[in-house]
């Protein structure tokens, strides 16, 4: 009798492996951080071998620490940092270059040239996305243009492209599977979310050979089996989704109008829009929420590039504290209206501004500003940015969210969650199981493997640990938010500067 599903959660700063039981409860966790590489201003890279080895080690560690045998594991679900782009040799499986991370801004000038040429409306109509260095297409084009011999080898069919899920799947299956799921494909800027196919016109625009691309499958599907020597047996890989869509599934936001916000390295707020691919008038993204049994469910998403990474910067860059767990106590030493605003535009601004040339700043410093105020401002920035997204979604969608489900590392901070509820003016629900991204991947695998009959059965497993009710006066909420909007305007750059970013 199988007792567990193994979920691989490959994130931006660490890889984790988690075992879940049938009730969606965590049986064991293993986590390993890996190096971030910053070869130039605005550039962010990962060593693909670091990613692979960290995934392999954490999978083995969680099995060892829990004593789970290969016979007790039904299969694997996988979720991943999205948009991060890899190019590798089909024969050897060796990457041609470090992975270019979703945060990377090196293609800013090329993106601006596409915008200036009038291509954005066309791209948005097919992909639901905007033109930005965030997405995979311009990163892949950069690799083909800048890695010696890459374009010629790609034209000869010698190379393979993939986001992190595709690369890991290739490695796990010994190169037998070159595939992705519809959620990850929808983040490349090469996939038509309406036809659910790679788009020939987009491939032509970005100069991408079709031979590079993986097969696109449902989020619950047969993705092959892991080679027995990796984990001790040929485990089926049965579910894949990009991290934010996986979190939507883990939060069981299956009805239109249900929304979740994940606070990891970045912050990503997604609202389920059902069978309709809603178009945002506020520069949010239309994306695939999940695809099951050939049926696509859509979502609208706001993407904030820096959330938990702000805490990491305050810890590692400014050395203001030794551990992230200290931030709550520091923030409680301040009042909400302390007057300091930290705009963490370290890699530009995401939704709804989409300004790759913007850079971070701290405003409102006075002689008595201390560590506590700066830390509190960093935490509040995450909540202000969520408010930015909420305002856009409320304007775009009739069935806007009346409450918000939250997950990710930052939500364990009660001070942040209360300020978030106060800033949004809606209840914020924190689930019993916070590992919702990994849990969503496990649920998707469980659907394919017959553990769960349908989404209704999965929805019945969700439990709320605590609800944070808004308590701030509306006048104070709006006063604080106006200060944030003023700070945002100060860090934005002009179109001319953007073109050089």
Image (cartoon, helix red, strand yellow):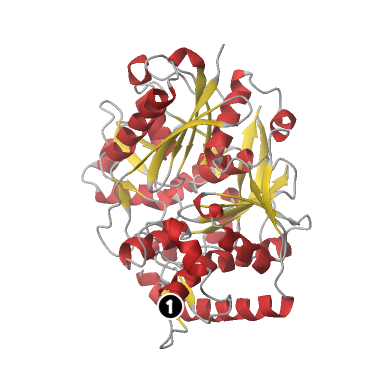
**Position above or below: 245 against 486:** above
The relative height of residue 418 versus residue 86 in the rendered view (above or below) is below
List x then y, in percent, for residue 362: 43, 77
The furthest residue to the left: 148
To which quarter of the image does residue 133 belong?
Answer: bottom left
Residue 215 at x, y percent in the picture: 48, 30
Total of numbered circles in the picture?
1
Specify the farthest residue to the bottom: 367
* Residue 400 in view (yes/no): yes
Which residue has dot 1 on it?
Answer: 362
x, y percentage for residue 217? 55, 29
Please identify the quadrant where the C terminus is shown.
bottom left
Residue occupying image coordinates x 62% and y 76%: 481
**Residue 218 in view:** no
- Residue at 35% across / 27% down in the picture? 171
In this view, 230 is above or below 58: above
- Which quarter of the picture shows residue 182? top right
Element under disc 1: strand
Location of the N terminus by quadrant is top right
Q: Is residue 316 above or below residue 278?
A: below
* Image position, residue 167 (x, y; %): 38, 34
């Amino acid at each position: 009798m199988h007792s567990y599903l193994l979920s691989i959660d490959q994130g931006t700063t660490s890889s984790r492996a988690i075992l879940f039981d049938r009730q969606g409860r965590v049986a064991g966790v293993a986590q390993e951080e890996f190096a971030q590489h910053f070869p130039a201003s605005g550039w962010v890279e990962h060593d693909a071998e670091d990613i692979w080895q960290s995934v392999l080690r954490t999978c083995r560690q969680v099995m060892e620490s829990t004593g789970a045998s290969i016979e007790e594991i039904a299969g694997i679900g996988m979720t991943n940092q999205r948009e991060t782009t890899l190019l590798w040799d089909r024969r050897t499986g060796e990457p041609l270059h470090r992975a270019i991370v979703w945060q990377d801004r090196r293609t800013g000038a090329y993106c601006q040239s596409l915008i200036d040429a009038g291509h954005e409306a066309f791209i948005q109509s097919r992909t639901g996305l905007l033109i930005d260095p965030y997405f995979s297409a311009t990163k892949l084009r950069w690799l083909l243009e800048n890695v010696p011999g890459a374009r010629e080898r790609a034209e000869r069919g010698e190379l393979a492209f993939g986001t992190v899920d595709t690369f890991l799947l290739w490695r796990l299956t010994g190169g037998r599977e070159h595939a992705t799921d519809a959620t990850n494909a929808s983040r490349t800027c090469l996939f038509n979310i309406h036809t659910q196919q790679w788009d020939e016109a987009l491939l032509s625009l970005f100069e991408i050979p079709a031979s590079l691309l993986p097969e696109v499958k449902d989020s619950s599907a047969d993705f092959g089996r892991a080679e027995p020597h990796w984990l001790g047996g040929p485990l089926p890989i049965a579910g894949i989704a990009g991290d934010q869509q996986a979190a939507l599934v883990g939060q069981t936001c299956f009805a239109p109008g249900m929304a979740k916000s994940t606070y990891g390295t970045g912050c990503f707020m997604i609202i389920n829009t059902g069978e309709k691919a809603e178009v945002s008038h506020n520069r949010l993204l239309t994306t695939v929420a999940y695809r099951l049994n050939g049926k696509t469910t859509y979502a609208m998403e706001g993407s904030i590039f820096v959330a938990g990474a702000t805490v990491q910067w305050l810890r590692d860059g400014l050395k203001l504290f030794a551990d992230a767990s200290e931030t709550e106590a520091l923030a409680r030493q301040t009042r909400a209206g302390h007057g300091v605003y930290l705009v963490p535009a370290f890699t530009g601004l995401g939704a709804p501004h989409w300004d790759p040339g913007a850079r971070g700043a701290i405003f409102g410093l006075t002689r008595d500003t201390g560590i506590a105020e700066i830390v509190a401002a960093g935490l509040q920035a995450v909540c202000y940015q969520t408010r930015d997204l909420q305002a856009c979604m409320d304007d775009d969608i009739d069935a806007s969210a009346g409450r918000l489900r939250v997950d990710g590392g930052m939500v364990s901070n009660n001070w942040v969650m209360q300020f978030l509820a106060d800033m949004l003016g809606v209840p914020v629900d924190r689930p019993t199981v916070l590992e919702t991204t990994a849990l969503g991947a496990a649920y998707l695998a469980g659907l394919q493997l017959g553990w769960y009959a349908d989404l209704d059965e999965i929805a019945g497993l969700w439990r709320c640990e605590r609800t944070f009710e808004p308590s701030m006066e509306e006048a104070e909420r709006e006063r604080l938010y106006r200060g944030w909007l003023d700070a945002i305007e100060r860090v934005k750059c002009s179109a001319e500067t953007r073109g050089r970013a």
